Image: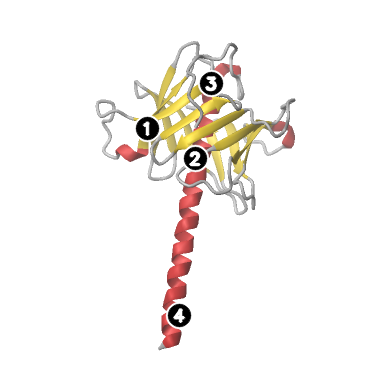
């Protein structure tokens, strides 16, 4: 992982909208409910956003909602891609003209890592160079979002300290520290995508184990 440079960007980082910029450092709490919903609140426990699963028959999907349950962006998994890619659209649109950015895993096989590359839909630089990247470990609640392929940090995910954690299920709750003038809706969207990728990986591993168990049982029956 690149050495972190926590100096703020010289200009505002607006991806989803300038209304989601704060002039100061922002700490948010992310709580994963048993329903799969991500509940995002500030340090005073005031709800800011929700991320809800809204899977279709063909795609895994997530939608980022404001406090009035109005959609801000919809995240859609790219079907049948080795890098587990996702599209992000404005509002609840699925039109290419409303696409904001795409993501993919940095490597097809990532052991103990949660590295993701982000590419803006309207990028003018090389298509092979990411505009943002996520590095770290989701299982350890230690992921960092960087500007492009640099060491400039725009957001840092971390475990809650014991004094901050008043909820029984500590592993489902964590903190994200967002730098000043950084689009916090974009950061939350990236957290939601990484969480969805990790959840999908767990389900895939579980399915493989079930299939392997069934094959063992069938093999045993045939030998009887």
Between the residue at mark 4 and the residue at mark 2, the CA separation in whole angstroms equals 36 Å
Disc 1 vs disc 2: Cβ atoms closer than 8 Å?
no
Q: Can residue 69 be seen in this view?
A: no
Between the residue at mark 3 and the residue at mark 2, the CA separation in whole angstroms equals 18 Å
Of 126 and 220, which appears nearest the observer? 126
Name the residue tied to disc 3: 152
Q: Is residue 4 visible?
A: yes
Q: Disc 3 or 2, which lies upstream in sequence?
A: 2
> Which secondary structure lies at badge 4?
helix
Name the residue tied to disc 2: 114
Front position among marks 4 and 1: 4
Between the residue at mark 1 and the residue at mark 2, the CA separation in whole angstroms equals 16 Å
> Which secondary structure lies at badge 3?
loop
Name the residue tied to disc 4: 219
Badge 3 density bin: few <14, some 14–19, many ≥20, Cα 10 Å: many
Badge 1 density bin: few <14, some 14–19, many ≥20, Cα 10 Å: many
Front position among marks 1 and 2: 2
Q: Residue 31: give x, y in percent of width and height.
A: 38, 35
Name the residue tied to disc 1: 174
> Which secondary structure lies at badge 1?
strand
| Residue found at the far bottom of this picture | 224
Locate residue 158: give its quadrant.
Answer: top left
Disc 4 vs disc 1: Cβ atoms closer than 8 Å?
no
Between the residue at mark 3 and the residue at mark 1, the CA separation in whole angstroms equals 22 Å
Q: Would you say 178 lies left or right of 59 here?
A: left
Q: Disc 4 or 2, which lies upstream in sequence?
A: 2
Front position among marks 4 and 3: 3
Front position among marks 3 and 1: 3
Q: Disc 1 or 2, which lies upstream in sequence?
A: 2
Locate residue 12: give its quadrant.
Answer: top right
Of 188 and 52, which appears nearest the observer? 188
């Amino acid at each position: 992982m690149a050495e972190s440079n926590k100096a703020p960007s010289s200009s505002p980082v607006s991806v989803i909208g300038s209304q989601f910029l704060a002039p100061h450092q922002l700490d948010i709490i992310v709580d994963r409910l048993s329903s799969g919903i991500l509940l995002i609140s500030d340090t005073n426990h005031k709800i800011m956003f929700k991320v809800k699963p809204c899977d279709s028959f063909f795609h895994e999907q997530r939608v980022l909602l404001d406090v009035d349950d109005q959609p801000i962006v919809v995240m859609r998994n790219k079907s049948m891609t080795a890098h587990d890619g996702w599209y992000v659209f404005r509002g609840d649109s699925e039109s290419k003209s409303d696409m904001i950015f795409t993501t993919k895993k940095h490597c097809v096989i990532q052991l103990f890592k949660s590295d993701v590359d982000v590419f803006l839909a309207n990028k003018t630089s090389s298509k092979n160079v990411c505009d943002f990247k996520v590095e770290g470990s989701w299982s350890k609640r230690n992921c960092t979002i960087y500007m492009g392929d640099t060491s400039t940090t725009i957001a840092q995910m971390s475990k809650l300290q014991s004094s901050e954690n008043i909820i029984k299920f500590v592993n489902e709750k964590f903190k994200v520290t967002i730098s000043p003038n950084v689009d916090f809706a974009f950061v939350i969207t990236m957290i939601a995508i990484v969480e969805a990728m990790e959840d999908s990986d767990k389900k895939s591993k579980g399915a493989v184990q079930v299939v392997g168990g069934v094959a063992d049982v069938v093999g045993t029956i045939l030998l009887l």
